[in-house]
Image (tube, rainbow, N blue to C red):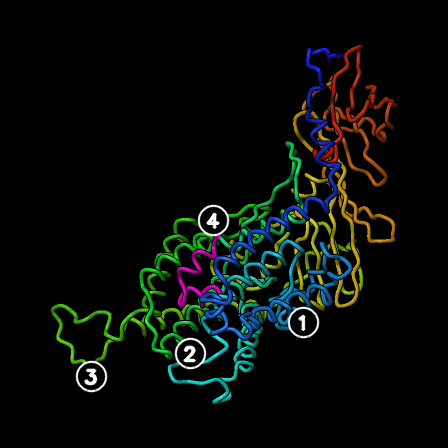
């Protein structure tokens, strides 16, 4: 028996062999194993729980054929918009999204479709899964059949299951339109409707909704385990933006308050009792888990401020209002005022329910007024440079330290710093679509070296690529050039930065790397007077500038003078592209 050098009668298992073994298993085999496990588990549940028994009876008592048809049809609308309007049918992971944002009332297409459009496949699936969970609970509370004692289906038009299903689907569509029309800024996504459904569900079934907070994320995990049965991880350098700064918290809160208010009205009309403790706890669990406390604003150039303390305090106030609106009594909230005699007939005090509902309605009106003011305005394209790339009604450009026109659509007196936020990066402007949007930030372009801008409309799409190349000198200064290349055309130089001056002196001379039209060049100066300037040498070459010899080796540039050689500059290569 032969032995390995380690003395073992078999080859040692290495990380490489394990990886090869894992990667050799077909994807279908992994998926069959998962499907089989799910099937066995569901079969056991079916056998024990007997859907034809109490569970099945409950579902059939509320749903036609035991299914939430209104939720499924509403989600079907969202899927159709993604596949056939945004072009997701042929481009599953990168649909057209820019023209389907709610930018202004002057661009009605965006307002009509923003609540049902999505940025990508992950964004879509997240809202579909959460919408399925919370929508099913809300639809169960609404019921396909009348719930009043003694009522019968088809006795009136409203008691018809098909009418009730249609009303639920119509409510979903209406919620999508309202949240898009009254949100602040160019929102996109179905999440406003999801929060409306969750707000409705919390009032009727707080415990089920609290459980669903954890449940819907596991649906996402189940899908991820199916499409990616395994993953091989290793450390990597990546650019990471501020994730919560892309969340439309105001739109979420707006939809949530609508759902709560509608549920409070319905539960009162049905004369049902509600559990204050359960509603309060479910509200806190849901709002904390879903980040409704994340109140933030823009500081400019990828910097933001978030007010966690104030946001969390508001959630406690919100939970109290919801408890009062849904489960408060008809008696006056203040009872009697100490030390003051009040004639109730002349000065009636509002009940707890009425007061809480009034506060919620006032909040919704105030938020709507801001949304209307924003959407009646339109961003300006005054900061767009003359060399912007034009594709149909779009202009694409690279800008630095300009006013973010998305935030400057409404001037706030005495608070210019709130709306006068500066930004840098690749931006898109369309007067026709009332759109001004930063697609790739300066930091993101610097980190990755390139970025994509996807333009389009109903039935068409075209991409524009952005590239950045640069050099850093000793001392940390950086100089760079930015290019834009529309699909099928030559790239165009659209931006050059200031020269980068090295923090060193060679024979009483200073060295700078300068961006030029064709490439970068080396400039040598003495006492602020330029002695000479030459293009950077090619890889492995050298050039003499102002009496100093420069050699380029790999990504490094070295200078040699009087027999002394030292590094003066390095080519900026993003970590993700090394």
User: Where is mark 2, residue-wise?
Assistant: 147
Q: Quadrant of the N terminus?
A: top right
Vertical side of 113 occupied by 525: above or below: above
Q: Residues within 10 Å of mark 4 (few under 14, many from 20)?
A: some
Q: CA distance from mark 1 to mark 4?
A: 32 Å
Please state the extent of the stretch shown in magenta in the rendering: 196-214
Q: CA distance from mark 1 to mark 2?
A: 38 Å
How far from the left and from the top, in percent, is residue 480?
A: 74, 38
Question: Which label was assigned to residue 346?
Answer: 3
Mark 1 touches mark 2? (CB < 8 Å): no
Mark 3 touches mark 2? (CB < 8 Å): no
The kind of secondary structure element at disc 4 is strand
Front residue of this view, candidates 509 and 115: 115
User: Where is mark 4, residue-wise?
Assistant: 306
Which mark is in front, 4 or 2? 2
The quarter holding residue 14 reads top right
Q: Which is more N-terminal, label 4 or label 1? A: 1
Front residue of this view, candidates 559 and 250: 250
Mark 3 touches mark 1? (CB < 8 Å): no
Q: CA distance from mark 3 to mark 2?
A: 39 Å
Q: Residues within 10 Å of mark 3 (few under 14, many from 20)?
A: few
């Amino acid at each position: 028996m032969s032995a390995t050098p380690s003395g073992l009668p078999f080859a040692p298992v290495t990380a490489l062999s394990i990886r090869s073994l894992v990667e050799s298993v077909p994807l279908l085999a992994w998926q069959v194993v998962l499907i089989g496990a799910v099937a066995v588990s569901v079969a056991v549940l079916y056998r024990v729980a007997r859907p034809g028994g109490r569970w099945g009876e409950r579902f059939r008592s509320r749903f036609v054929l035991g299914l939430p048809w209104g939720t499924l049809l509403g989600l079907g609308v969202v899927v159709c918009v993604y596949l056939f309007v945004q072009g997701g049918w042929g481009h599953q992971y990168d649909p057209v999204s820019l023209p389907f944002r709610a930018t202004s009332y002057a661009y009605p297409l965006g307002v009509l479709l923003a609540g049902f459009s999505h940025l990508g496949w992950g964004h879509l699936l997240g809202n579909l899964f959460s919408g399925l969970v919370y929508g099913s609970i809300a639809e169960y509370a609404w019921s396909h059949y009348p719930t009043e004692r003694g009522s019968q289906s088809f006795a009136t038009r409203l008691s018809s299951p098909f009418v009730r299903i249609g009303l639920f689907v119509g409510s979903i569509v209406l919620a999508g339109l309202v949240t898009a029309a009254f949100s602040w800024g160019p929102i996109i996504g179905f999440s406003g409707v999801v929060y409306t459904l969750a707000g409705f569900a919390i009032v009727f079934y707080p415990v089920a909704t609290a459980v669903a907070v954890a449940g819907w994320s596991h649906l996402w995990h189940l899908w991820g385990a199916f499409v990616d049965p395994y993953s091989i991880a290793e450390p990597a350098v990546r650019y990471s933006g501020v994730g919560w700064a892309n969340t439309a918290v105001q739109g979420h809160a707006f939809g949530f308050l609508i759902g709560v208010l509608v549920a409070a009205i319905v539960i009162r009309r049905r004369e049902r009792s509600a559990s204050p403790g359960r509603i309060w706890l479910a509200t806190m669990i849901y709002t904390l888990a879903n980040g409704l406390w994340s109140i933030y604003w823009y500081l400019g150039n990828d910097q933001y401020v978030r007010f966690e303390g104030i946001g969390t305090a508001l959630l406690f106030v919100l939970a109290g209002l919801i408890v009062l609106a849904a489960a408060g009594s008809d008696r006056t909230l203040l009872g009697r005022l100490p030390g003051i005699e009040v004639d109730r007939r002349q000065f009636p005090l509002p009940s707890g329910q009425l007061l809480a509902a009034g506060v919620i309605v006032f909040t919704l009106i105030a938020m709507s007024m801001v949304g209307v003011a924003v959407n009646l305005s339109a961003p300006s394209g005054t900061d767009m440079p003359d060399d912007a790339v034009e594709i149909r009604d779009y202009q694409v450009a690279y800008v630095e330290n300009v006013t973010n026109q998305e935030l400057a659509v409404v001037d706030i007196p005495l608070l210019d710093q709130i709306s006068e936020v500066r930004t840098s990066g690749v931006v898109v402007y369309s007067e026709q679509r009332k759109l001004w949007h930063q697609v790739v930030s300066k930091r993101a372009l610097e980190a990755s070296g390139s970025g994509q801008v996807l333009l389009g409309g109903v039935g068409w799409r075209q991409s524009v690529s952005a590239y950045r190349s640069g050099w850093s000198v000793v001392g940390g200064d950086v100089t760079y050039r930015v290019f834009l290349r529309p699909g099928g055309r030559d790239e165009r130089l659209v931006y050059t930065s200031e020269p980068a001056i090295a923090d060193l002196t060679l024979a009483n001379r200073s060295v700078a790397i300068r961006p030029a039209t064709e490439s970068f060049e080396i400039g040598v100066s003495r006492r602020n007077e330029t002695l000479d300037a030459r293009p950077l040498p090619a890889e492995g070459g050298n050039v003499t500038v102002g009496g100093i010899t420069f050699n380029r080796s790999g990504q490094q540039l070295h200078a040699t003078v009087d027999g002394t050689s030292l590094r003066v500059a390095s080519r900026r290569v993003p970590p993700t592209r090394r």
